[in-house]
Amino acid sequence: MNLKVLFGFHAVTVRLKTAPQTVAELFVDAGRRDARMRQFTERAQAAGVLLQDSDDERLTRLAGSPRHQGVVARVQPLKLPHTPDGVLEAVQAEGRGPALLLVLDGVTDPHNLGACLRVADGAGAHAVVAPKDHAAGLNATVAKVASGAAETVPYVVVTNLARALADIKDHGLRVIGTSDDAERTLYDLDLTGPVALVLGAEGKGMRQLTRTSCDELVRIPMAGAVESLNVSVAAAVCLYEALRQRLPKE
């Protein structure tokens, strides 16, 4: 089985918490003895994972980045749903309430993708969907920025995004796109039902075919001088508005 690399305290700690049996190798900086590292090693030992002392040079080589924080793991890939159908079937089977998907069109920066996954996890989204081409793929940098969310939120890659949106509609979801020139705002919508929120890359926005595949377009109100938000910030605004509307009313 091909192993994947995770690095950084957050990403590796989430894997130790959710699926410690999938951690094949765990390397730590032998020279780091601070409280955070002690707490981490105690968690790993409690999970029954063997620690291997290493140095900064080797950890950087394993992680492919110097931003490993002294922690690198080689792990088995998790079996998350990998198609929109699989995600929506899992949502229905688990009784997790109305489906909430985040769809990203043209987001190529791994840092933005990682931040979007982290937001999606926090807001309770059931999956993040993106096209195979012109999009960032899951890698160690994405996992680091996602702080563990790449391990908990399915990242569904589709060959044809417009066709995938049509399939999502067939499952009863409304497809809501975001556009700076839309007449209605996000806050005009009822997001309590099954919905897929579509965001494009900062600057370019959604592609035309994606735009026409949406049931409706909305905008995020902007009261300042800047014209748009970073895609991960926009994703947070949209997903947390859906979450706010879905929370039980006291």
Image: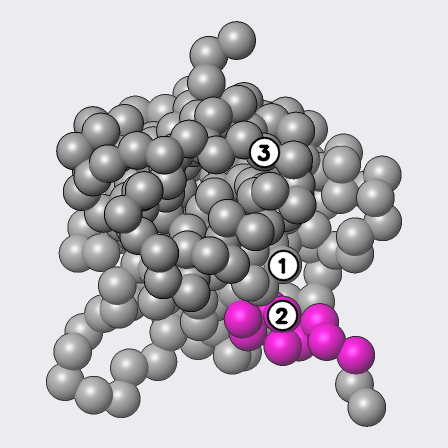
Q: Residue at x 63, y 59 (%)?
A: 124
Label 3 secondary element: loop
| Residue 96 drawn above or below residue 249 | above
Range of the magenta residues? 240-248
Mark carried by residue 49: 3
Q: Secondary structure at mark 2?
A: helix
Mark 3 or mark 1: name the one nearer the start of the chain: 3
Is residue 244 part of the magenta span, yes or no?
A: yes
Q: Compare marks 2 and 1 and give the one earlier in the sequence.
A: 1
* Dots 2, 1 in contact, CB < 8 A: yes
Rendered location of residue 86, percent (x, y):
68, 28
Residue at horizontal 42 percent and vertical 62 percent from the top: 36
Q: Position of residue 52 (x, y in %)?
A: 42, 31
Nearer to us in this view, 103 or 70: 70
**Mark 2 lies on residue:** 243
For marks 3 and 1, give the CA distance.
29 Å
In the drawing, does residue 117 fall left or right of residue 66? right
Q: Which residue is mark 1?
A: 124
